[in-house]
Image: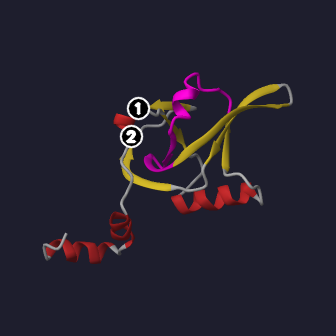
Amino acid sequence: MPLHLLKLCVGIESIEHLARVQKARRKGRAKGSFHITRQLPKRAEEILDGGSIYWVIKGVIRVRQRIIGIDTIYRGEGRYCRLLLHRDLVPVVPQPRRPHQGWRYLDPADAPADLTAAERRLKAMPPEMLAELKSLGLL
């Protein structure tokens, strides 16, 4: 069973903003996105068995990315962990989270479910339209 990571997305305003930042960081790299952190997960094997990193944006888990690799890199005199991430950002059912430092393990049972295409379309609707559809009993 895969194990996930939970990480705050500091300075990011939305899923779209995260996508723009990651695209700018890639700049023509053939591989997917990456995130560099200080600590190497001790349970890396479980994470690589289909795990994802769940991003907390503005106090809410909003999106996940599949982790496709974990390696060690050296910068200056320090050793760091590079998480290689699939390029696709998968929106999830929003779930509030308190702030924390670094990353945390996230058990699959506690991970929010992916949003379906229909749910994504509903979220994109103007709030007034959603309210009207609900008042008519159509949602």
Q: Is residue 14 visible?
A: no
Q: Amino acid at mark 2?
A: Ala
Mark 1 in CB contact with mark 2 (< 8 angstroms):
yes
On screen, residue 119 versus residue 4, left or right, reads left
Can you say which quadrant of the picture contains the N terminus?
Answer: top left
Q: Reply above or below: 96 against 72.
A: below
Give the numbered dot on residue 72: none
Find disc 1 in the rendering and name its residue.
107
On screen, residue 9 versus residue 72, left or right, reads left
Residue 125: give x, y in percent of width and height. Answer: 35, 74
Question: Magenta stretch: residue 48 in it?
Answer: yes
Residue at the extreme top: 42
Residue at the extreme right: 76
Q: Residues within 10 Å of mark 1 (few under 14, many from 20)?
A: some
Q: Is residue 130 visible?
A: yes
Residue 12: give x, y in percent of width and height. Answer: 57, 53
Q: How is the image coloured?
A: secondary structure
Q: Which residues are magenta?
A: 37-64
Q: Amino acid at mark 1?
A: Asp
Kind of element beneath mark 1: loop
Query: What residue is at 64 percent from the left and 38 percent from the top?
Result: 69
Can you say which quadrant of the picture contains the C terminus?
Answer: bottom left
Residue 58: give x, y in percent of width and height. Answer: 48, 50
Q: CA distance from mark 1 to mark 2?
A: 6 Å
Question: Magenta stretch: residue 39 in it?
Answer: yes
Query: What residue is at 58 percent from the left and 60 percent from the top?
Result: 17
Give the numbered dot on residue 111: 2
Kind of element beneath mark 2: loop
